[in-house]
Image (spheres, rainbow, N blue to C red):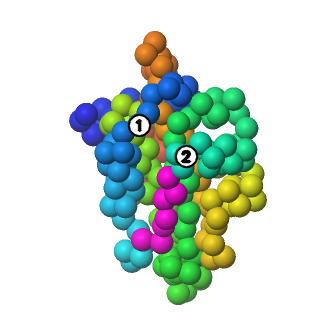
């Protein structure tokens, strides 16, 4: 799909056909899009936890109990190590959230390009999710993304409500 069309047409999708498996090659292309994302000082402080086994999906889904989420056949949990991310010397700003947001965005756009529905989630039970994925001491969970093919009869809303460009751009 042409890049600008992809951005314009992408929608958050919370409706998945749980019976449609996502091919490993497709998942690898999506994960690779995250791997190729830029990060401050090229530190690449991320780990992408691909959750697809029934046991682990059950544990991870307990951290976000929305009905639609329970149908997602695959979840990517995005974590990062704060000790590996770049820190601005002057004020101590740690780039971890910026770096991980860019990586998630790359994967969400790649999922759209592959014909998958995706939803970026940050409203989860942090402790449950951390335990389910075996989070390490220096790591933080930034977000997770549910992935799946929409049902055959699914139609996008076509309603992308955004402010006008002149309202969000300041030219100086």
Task: Please provide percent x and percent y for residue 158.
Answer: 45, 20
Asked if residue 103 can be seen in this view, the reply is yes
Q: Which residue is mark 2?
A: 53
| Label 1: element kind | loop
State the predominant SS element of the stretch in magenta: strand
**Which region of the structure is painted magenta?**
44-50
Which of discs 1 and 2 lies nearer the camera? The answer is 2
Q: Is residue 17 magenta?
A: no
Q: Looking at the image, is mark 1 or mark 2 earlier in the sequence?
A: 1
Q: Is residue 165 left or right of residue 72?
A: left
In the rendered image, the vertical position of residue 137 relative to residue 63, given as above or below: below
Quadrant assignment, res 26: top left
The answer to whether residue 136 is left or right of residue 7 is: right
Question: Which residue is denoted by mark 1 in the rendering?
Answer: 22
Q: Residue at x 37, y 61 (%)?
A: 35
Asked if 48 appears above or below 113 in the picture, the reply is: below
Q: Quadrant of the N terminus?
A: top left
């Amino acid at each position: 799909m042409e890049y600008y069309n992809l951005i314009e047409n992408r929608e958050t999708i919370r409706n998945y056909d749980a019976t449609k498996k996502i091919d490993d090659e497709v998942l690898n292309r999506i994960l690779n899009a995250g791997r190729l994302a830029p990060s401050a000082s090229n530190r690449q402080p991320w780990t992408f936890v691909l959750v697809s086994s029934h046991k682990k999906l059950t544990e991870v889904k307990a951290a976000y109990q929305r009905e639609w989420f329970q149908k997602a056949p695959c979840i990517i949990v995005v974590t990062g190590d704060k000790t590996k991310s770049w820190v601005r010397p002057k004020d101590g700003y740690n780039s971890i959230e910026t770096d991980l947001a860019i990586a998630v965005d790359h994967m969400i756009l790649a999922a759209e390009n592959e014909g998958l529905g995706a939803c970026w989630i940050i409203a989860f039970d942090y402790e449950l999710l951390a335990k389910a994925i075996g989070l390490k001491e220096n790591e933080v969970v930034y977000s997770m993304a549910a992935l799946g093919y929409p049902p055959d009869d699914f139609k996008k809303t076509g309603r992308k409500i955004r402010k006008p460009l002149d309202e969000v751009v300041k030219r100086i």
